[in-house]
Image (cartoon, grey):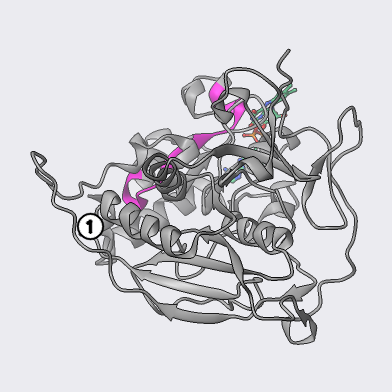
Amino acid sequence: MTRRVDPRRPALITAQGLRRIILGGTEGERDVRLGAAAPAAERRPRLAQPASACLLVVTHPDSGGIDEHAREAIAAAALLARADEAVVVVMPCADASLQLDPAALGIDRLELLPVTEATTADALADAVAERWGTLRPRLVLMPDRGDDADLGRRLAVAQGLAVAASVVEIAEGRARVRDHGAMGRASGDATASLADLDLLLVARHVARTDLPFVGRGEQLALPAPAARPTVGVQDLGRVSGKAQQVALEEADFILAAGNGVTDVALFHELAQALGAAVGASRVAVDDGRFPRSQQIGATGRTVQARGYLAMGISGAVQHLQGIRECRHVMAVNTDPAAPIAQRSELVLAEDVQNLMRALLMLVRTTPASAETAS
Ligand SMILES: Cc1cc2nc3c(=O)[nH]c(=O)nc-3n(C[C@H](O)[C@H](O)[C@H](O)COP(=O)(O)OP(=O)(O)OC[C@H]3O[C@@H](n4cnc5c(N)ncnc54)[C@H](O)[C@@H]3O)c2cc1C
């Protein structure tokens, strides 16, 4: 019988730093502390000798740096790497002025792959496949989300790699996947030996990122990917979609309404002007102000936007469950002591209708707003 694993079930981070799901466990997520994370300058180098092999991580940057998911994939590689294996990260990158410290992240060599708007997904996959062929890593790790997930699947198909997708746990030389089907096997368990795998597409929280060591931190620039002739295909370029049509789970910036929002038309006007996707609390959905598909929380959608602006939302625990993965949360609430304040980096104690009107006026009189709204 196939055993399925709920990735949200209780787990602990092992002393090695990798995620271990507690089968049959009842406690919440626990950490075995490795000791307080020391500054990079005080950590020992992981590689004591020249590397003769490597583990490869391929990941895109995010807003001039890298996000937590990418950090976790790199940390997992660094924790899995043997004493003679380097951690090499290939990063497709439009802007060379990245704000990151490769050594502190556990990276031994960061290879920047210059890309432009014109670089097609196929050309990028070819360039990464070329690096894979040259480096012949024991294992490739990539975050299983967005562009990285797409690139990973292209690489797996092109090179005939044994791939595990949605990896939620790496323990005792095995990778556990969220879903049996993702392993691509006809029968068996939902785990596979790392020795049988070439590529791990990892979910969130597979490894902790406060590593007890540093990487070598070398950096080099790769040549730009060669253009790939596409026979019978005409590239019409990129077309920007409206934020309101993007699935909430994919949205980068969400404007969310709660019971405090009474002027729904004004709220939608503001969302459009800001180029934000629209979310709502259950109360705002239950009384018909917003469709059920826009409800965020325990019984709604789980979102992972970079920006989440909560308008007139109290921040009940069920709502907070849905925004756990959001990076920056801001709130507007007449009650500065509302629970949402605990989760927010910025709280504006203001009537939400007043604030929406003021913000809309500000956005409309700022030159860049016309571009955002289109
Ligand atoms: C089993 C279960 C599952 C649930 N699932 C979900 C879920 O998935 N998602 C979800 O959201 N909830 C869920 N709930 C409901 C949840 O417990 C809360 O009732 C709900 O989130 C409250 O919504 P709210 O914050 O919009 O409304 P309220 O609790 O009414 O809070 C409104 C907030 O707006 C502020 N406010 C009021 N007027 C203004 C104004 N003019 N300007 C500025 N601020 C103002 C108030 O100070 C208050 O903080 C669930 C509950 C249960 C029991």
- Secondary structure, mark 1, is helix
Residue 323 visible to an observer of this rendering: yes
In the rendered image, residue 276 lying in the magenta stretch gets the answer yes
- Point 47% across, 62% down: residue: 62
Question: In the image shown, does 156 or 326 lie closer to the viewer?
Answer: 156
Is residue 289 in sight in this rendering? no
Q: Nearer the viewer, residue 40 or 362?
A: 40
Task: Return the residue found at the far top.
Answer: 1
Task: Specify whether 372 is left or right of 104.
Answer: left
Residue 18, above or below 215:
above
Q: Amino acid at mark 1?
A: Ala
Residue shown at the point (77%, 52%) measured from the top left: 18
Horizontal side of 374 relative to 143 (left or right) equals: left
Looking at the picture, tell me which residue is in the foreground, 14 or 231: 231
x and y percentages locating residue 184 in the rendered image: 54, 27
Bounds of the magenta segment: 272-285
Q: Is residue 295 magenta?
A: no
Residue 38 in the image: above or below residue 302: below
Closer to the camera, 234 or 271?
Answer: 234
Badge 1 crowding class, 10 Å Cα cut-off, few under 14, some 14 to 19, many 20 or more, is few
Specify the quadrant of the image occupied by residue 101.
Answer: bottom right
* Quadrant in which the N terminus is drawn: top right
Q: Position of residue 186 (x, y in %)?
A: 57, 18
Measuring from the top left, give residue 264's x and y in whole percent: 43, 34
